[in-house]
Amino acid sequence: MSKRFMFEKPMGMRDTLPEHYEKKKTVVEGMCSTMQSWGYRMIGTPTVEYSDTIGRVSAIEEQQLFTLMDRDGHSLVLRPDMTSPIARVASSKLAKERLPLRLAYEENVFRAQQREGGRPAEFTQVGVELIGDKTFAADAEIIAIADEALRAVGLRSFKFLLGHIGFVKAFFRANLDTAEQVDALLRALYEKNLVGYGEAVESFQLQVAKEERLRQFLHLRGGEDLFQRAESLIQTEEERNALGDVHTMFAHLKDYQVEATVKLDLTLVSHMTYYTGLLFEVYAGDVGAPIGNGGRYNQLVRQFGTQHAATGFAIRVDHLLEALPAPNPLSTPYGVLFDDESRTEAVEQAKKIRSTNQRVILQHVAGVEELTAFFGACARVIDMRKGGNE
């Protein structure tokens, strides 16, 4: 193994430099403030969890998990998402609290990368989980909060894609012959590989009517006119019920007046395999990946021993920051320059300026290699040295 350079970082890890840190902090605080205004309480979970609990139920592929071993030989993982740990807490320490639980978070998660590719292995998620409410009102509330939180931090142009994983699976089961064929088309949709989807459909050698329905399925995207087009393709009660869920959900979204930001997409699938019904992704600007996603996951909490329906969303802060306009630069700080004789007065002067919400650099003259650079970094310098001046 070659020796690491002194400045190397593990694959996928990033430093957060001051300007980016300030922008991220402002965005995270703005979103958390919005979520709390809807009655959600902030929660945190450990960075490290057990592999046979969170690692097993997280829906993140095993090769993306950061695994390690504790001193007792237990297999551990760095948390790959926040939904699974919160489901664990809801089923244990919060099990006796009155339902529904409204919980919010802002935490870093970890997913190992096979190659750098510009993708972070550690990133921040901000989101909410609504546990113990199985109604469409809960699903609509989740999207309404996400919409408001994104607007609160300055995002103006974004779109929700709303689908239903139950509809996709029911449609495929009605038109395909084997579970393997269903899995193949689900994978093609997840990878957004429409060419591969078409080639797979052709290779299955299905009845002409089934093959045509599967090709028409790819066009089930758009506005409310989509419901009529979908009705003409479905055959089973399972498909009809799932389509009805989407229709009902869209009506609820109108109550929140967010339907203008929602586009229906009945072909939508997710890598998060615990979704059981309605699901959505959020896209913005020129970002080449979703800035967030969410949906209904009625089975996940039950894996921890409680029979609670649940729904939620997570926003990827790094993707959101790409979509936001450049922030206003921080105000240039004041500078207070002092020597040993003027130290006490300088400290009091700096405190006085900070009390007016101004940023202040308090600098001992002996620590400045080049006074010209210090003066250039400050909007105004107050020289507290004996004989000094502003």
Image (tube, rainbow, N blue to C red):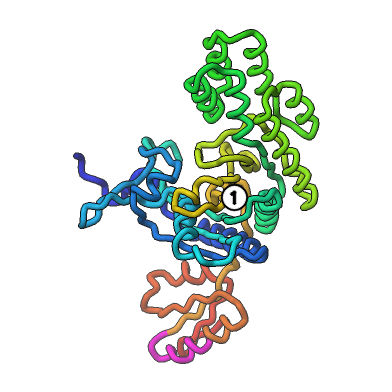
From this viewpoint, is residue 155 visible?
A: no
Measured from the top left, where is residue 189 in percent x and y?
A: 56, 27
Main secondary structure type of the part rendered in magenta: helix
Measured from the top left, where is residue 70 in percent x and y?
A: 24, 55
Q: Is residue 368 left or right of residue 336?
A: left
As drawn, 287 above or below 22: above
What amino acid is labelled 1 in the image?
Thr
Quarter of the image with the C terminus in it? bottom right
Instruction: Tell me which segment is drawn in magenta.
Output: 339-349
Secondary structure beneath disc 1? strand
Measured from the top left, where is residue 22 in percent x and y?
A: 54, 61
Q: Residue at x 79, y 34 (%)?
A: 224
As drawn, 64 above or below 336: above
Q: What residue is disc 1 on? A: 311
Q: Residue at x 58, y 71 (%)?
A: 379
Q: Is residue 343 magenta?
A: yes
From this viewpoint, is residue 229 visible?
A: yes
Q: Is residue 257 magenta?
A: no
Which quadrant of the figure has residue 164?
A: top right
Measured from the top left, where is residue 219 in percent x and y?
A: 69, 23
Q: Residue at x 72, y 44 (%)?
A: 249
Q: Is residue 224 left or right of residue 237?
A: right
Q: Is residue 194 left or right of residue 300?
A: right
